[in-house]
Amino acid sequence: MKSEDRFARYSRQIFIEEIGLEGQRKIMNSKVLVIGAGGIGSPVIQYLAAAGVGTLGVADFDEVELHNLNRQIIHNENTVGISKVKSAALFVRKLNHQVKFIGIEQKIDRSNAEEIMSDYDIVVDGSDNFATRYLINDTCVKLEKPLVYGSILGFSGQTAVFNYKGSKNLRDLFPEPPVAEDIPDCDSLGVLGALPGMIGSMMAMQVLKMITDLPIPPDQLSLIDTLHWRFQIIDF
């Protein structure tokens, strides 16, 4: 793509005083890993690809199912039955062919987490279980990688930035995961589709702010209750 076409594509970002050409160059040179291509991961992938993130890694081991489509917006009826990583790759290529997409069709576990995550500047946690969330957090701490975290259920969601420029991590907020039997999940209690769009968009914004060196208040958890339309910030 010619430089003038690239400028036109990203002009509405470049026109922002705090971003400019230098900020756009940083975005285009960045490497971000999104773990999970589901409800939260979908809007993160969408907006990072649209912004022109240079290298976008996506790790997921599931296939697209029909019930995913109310909220996992990068997938569609034609990709039901194929892997979410392949579906995400198709979406990104159609949206922005300049993005280098790296598909990782693996479950993140202790045997591969460090190897997979070590190549990226920022990690985004779009996983849906506590064991994976804590593994991702602990690996980011070990590798000194910033982590953007989010979770959703029903009408409620939360998001935070961990391990960024000396800030605290998940275990400082929640030292240990809850007992598995006490954990509700979207499969049993459901989620309204627009909620992960909100949380994922907030997470993508934090990623882009990190890349462009914009201020991110440390050690804050954002809580969103869309049923009662309440938004709360908790310092920890």
Image (tube, rainbow, N blue to C red):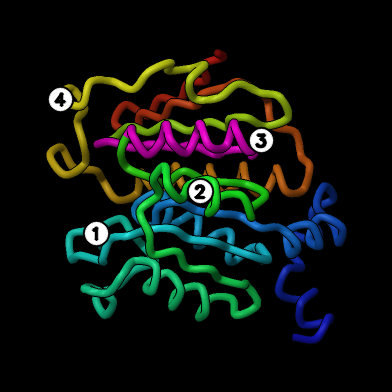
- Left or right, 20 with respect to 149, comes to right
- For label 3, the crowd category at 10 Å Cα-Cα, with few meaning under 14, some 14 to 19 and many 20 or more, is some
| Residue that badge 4 annotates | 181
142 w.r.t. 65: above or below: above
Please tell me in which quadrant of the rendered image residue 74 appears. Answer: bottom left
Looking at the picture, tell me which residue is in the foreground, 167 or 27.
Answer: 167
Q: Which residue is mark 3?
A: 144
User: Which of disc 4 and disc 3 is earlier in sequence?
Assistant: 3
Quarter of the image with the N terminus in it: bottom right
Decide if residue 122 is on the left or right side of residue 12. Answer: left
Question: Who comes first in sequence, dot 4 or dot 2?
Answer: 4
Query: Disc 4 to disc 1, how far (Cα)?
Result: 24 Å
SS of the residue at dot 3? loop
Along the polypeptide, which appears first: circle 3 or circle 2? Answer: 3
The residue beneath circle 1 is 68
Is residue 118 positioned above or below 2 on the image? Answer: above
Identify the residue at horizontal 42%, vertical 42% (top origin). 110
> Are the residues at dot 4 and dot 1 in contact (C-beta closer than 8 Å)?
no
Q: Secondary structure at mark 2?
A: helix
What is the x, y in percent for residue 12? 73, 63
Going from N to C along the chain, the mark reached first, 4 or 1, is 1
Query: Residue at coordinates 58% horizontally, 59% vertically from top-left?
Result: 48
For disc 2, the marked residue is 201
Report the mark closest to the observer, 4 or 2: 4
Q: Which residues are magenta?
A: 130-154
Residue 162 at x, y = what percent? 58, 30
**Mark 3, mark 4: which one is toward the viewer?**
3
